[in-house]
């Protein structure tokens, strides 16, 4: 859906993305939180557009934010960029806390979610053998277990990792929830369990609140869209790496 | 240095990620206590400070641990923003570019264990070096002095911390990674970077790294041989 582009300084704003990509979802959520208008351009990662290739020549991946003609690449760099440029926005507080130590903690767990959790659950989807799948399921559950502990430490009894409202770490982990739905639907794997006796009760409650936020409702596609995308990938790109899959 | 700040760095002499933090602390003019860890016999302090990864570097500031070198660098820049130069530029787009290249350098820093991985690794490194030559030209506005523009910044520190390992790799593999003809700006940047006091103090000795690498290879080969005899 095209919106009238309107940057803070009048510079136009475009986002090159893939609606089902966690890396794109998290960036779109920040833009939503800051009430920033932008033109969203869905990319075909099988046949990359000239705009994508020239805007991100090093990686040729999404998301890419193009502000006043200047590209910003890497979802974490884009999130901090948007946070800094639209810092004065009255509709959205900073996604990172003010205290440097708390910022480091949020960044640490976000890096963990992307480097340990995400590759593990992607591995479930691409596993060639039952043995490999079991291994990846174990890795995924171990990682989510760590994040359950982290939630206890970070949230101080509040709804989100960042407290009363969604922050950086909520976005990084929350943007992966869509794919947990795919894992449940297609593979019968439950990453965050909301039943009685769950090992991840805190995250179960967090996830419920996260998906109910305005920005999640606006930005996150439904599970079936992700399932269809995965099927497309399985047909065309067996054995893709994480990055080929989702960015 | 700010009064009442207790800084301790848990590290290992050979680790470029530890070197990175040493350089950043030195650039900011911050004093710290350095604790060399034996990675085969990790201290209680390390295990308690980084229970998730159990890795170095760990920076402990007034008793609170910060892990992951790129996170530590940003922390140092933010917690000590009034002390010494900034590692990150002020303009948001320039900051985003710095973060992009720092992530790029980190991704390319992974070393291979097997010969096959190492050969692939060299190829990737050479490709990365060409990309970085372009980055240096853009970031330094054509001057080539620093990625950080007028002065040393996050990218300079991130890449500079790898120099001893890159030179050791050149010695061991025979490949020329920084060719003054192919990548003139980078080759000059390396010469310049290596001359800084902060770099000389923090970077490990190349010969020592080569010896260390050989010993590790021998140990790995011995372990593999022993395993296959079972």
Image (cartoon, grey):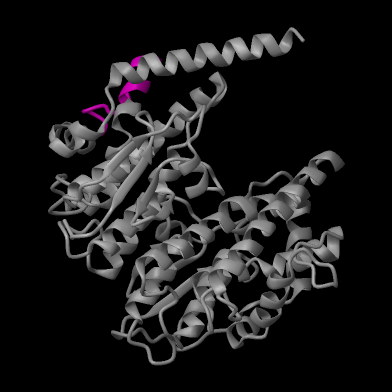
Residue drawn at point x = 81 percent, y = 67 percent: A198
Q: Position of residue B219 (x, y in %)?
A: 54, 13
Q: Position of residue B210 (x, y in %)?
A: 36, 16
B71 within the magenta span: no
Q: Is residue B118 left or right of residue B168?
A: right
Looking at the image, residue A204 lies above or below residue B98: below
Q: Is residue B54 left or right of residue B175?
A: right
Q: Nearer the viewer, residue B49 or A19?
A: B49
Q: Is residue B115 left or right of residue A211?
A: left
Q: Nearer the viewer, residue B192 or B219?
A: B219
Q: Position of residue B61 (x, y in %)?
A: 34, 55
Q: Nearer the viewer, residue B34 or A74?
A: B34
- In the rendered image, the quadrant that contains the N terminus of chain B is bottom left
- In the rendered image, the quadrant that contains the C terminus of chain B is top right
Q: Position of residue A128 (x, y in %)?
A: 81, 41
Residue drawn at point x = 51 percent, y = 84 percent: A32
Residue B134, image quadrant = top left
In the image, the segment drawn in magenta is B167-183
């Amino acid at each position: 859906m095209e919106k009238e582009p309107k940057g803070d300084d009048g510079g136009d704003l475009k986002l090159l993305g893939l609606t089902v990509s966690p890396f794109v979802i998290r960036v779109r959520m920040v833009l939503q939180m800051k009430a920033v208008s932008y033109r969203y351009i869905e990319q075909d990662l099988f046949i990359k557009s000239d705009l994508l290739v020239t805007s991100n020549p090093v990686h040729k991946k999404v998301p890419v934010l193009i502000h006043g003609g200047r590209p910003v690449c890497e979802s974490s760099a884009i999130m901090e960029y948007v946070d800094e440029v639209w810092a004065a926005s009255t509709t959205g507080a900073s996604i990172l806390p003010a205290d440097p130590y708390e910022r480091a903690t949020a960044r640490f767990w976000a890096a963990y979610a992307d480097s340990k959790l995400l590759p593990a659950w992607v591995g479930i989807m691409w596993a060639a053998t039952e043995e490999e799948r079991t291994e990846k399921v174990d890795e995924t559950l171990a990682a989510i277990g760590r994040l359950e502990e982290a939630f206890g430490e970070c949230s101080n009894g509040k709804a989100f990792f960042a407290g009363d409202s969604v922050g950086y770490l909520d976005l990084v982990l929350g943007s992966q929830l869509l794919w947990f739905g795919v894992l449940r639907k297609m593979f019968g794997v439950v990453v965050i369990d909301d039943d009685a006796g769950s090992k991840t009760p805190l995250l179960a409650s967090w996830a419920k609140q996260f998906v109910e936020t305005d920005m999640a409702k606006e930005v996150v596609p439904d599970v079936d869209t992700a399932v269809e995308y995965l099927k497309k990938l399985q047909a065309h790109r067996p054995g893709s790496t994480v990055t080929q899959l989702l960015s | 240095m700010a009064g009442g700040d207790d800084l301790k760095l848990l590290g290992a002499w050979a680790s470029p990620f530890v070197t990175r933090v040493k350089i950043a602390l030195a650039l900011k003019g911050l004093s710290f206590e350095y604790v060399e860890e034996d990675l085969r016999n990790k201290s209680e302090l390390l295990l308690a400070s980084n229970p998730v990864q159990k890795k170095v570097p760990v920076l402990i500031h007034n008793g609170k641990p910060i892990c992951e070198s790129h996170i530590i660098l940003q922390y140092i820049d933010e917690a000590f923003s009034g002390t010494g130069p900034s590692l990150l530029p002020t303009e948001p787009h320039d900051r985003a570019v710095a973060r992009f290249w720092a992530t790029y350098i980190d991704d390319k820093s992974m070393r291979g264990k097997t010969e096959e991985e190492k050969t692939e690794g060299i190829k990737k490194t050479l490709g990365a070096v060409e990309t970085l030559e372009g980055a240096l030209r853009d970031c330094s506005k054509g001057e080539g002095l620093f990625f950080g523009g007028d002065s040393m910044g996050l990218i300079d520190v991130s890449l500079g911390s790898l120099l001893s390992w890159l030179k050791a790799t050149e010695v061991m593999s025979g490949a020329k990674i920084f060719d003054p003809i192919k990548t003139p700006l980078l080759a000059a940047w390396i010469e310049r970077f290596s001359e800084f006091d902060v770099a000389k103090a923090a970077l490990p000795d190349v010969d020592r790294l080569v010896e260390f690498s050989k010993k590790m290879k021998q140990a790995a080969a011995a372990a593999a041989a022993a395993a296959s005899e079972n």
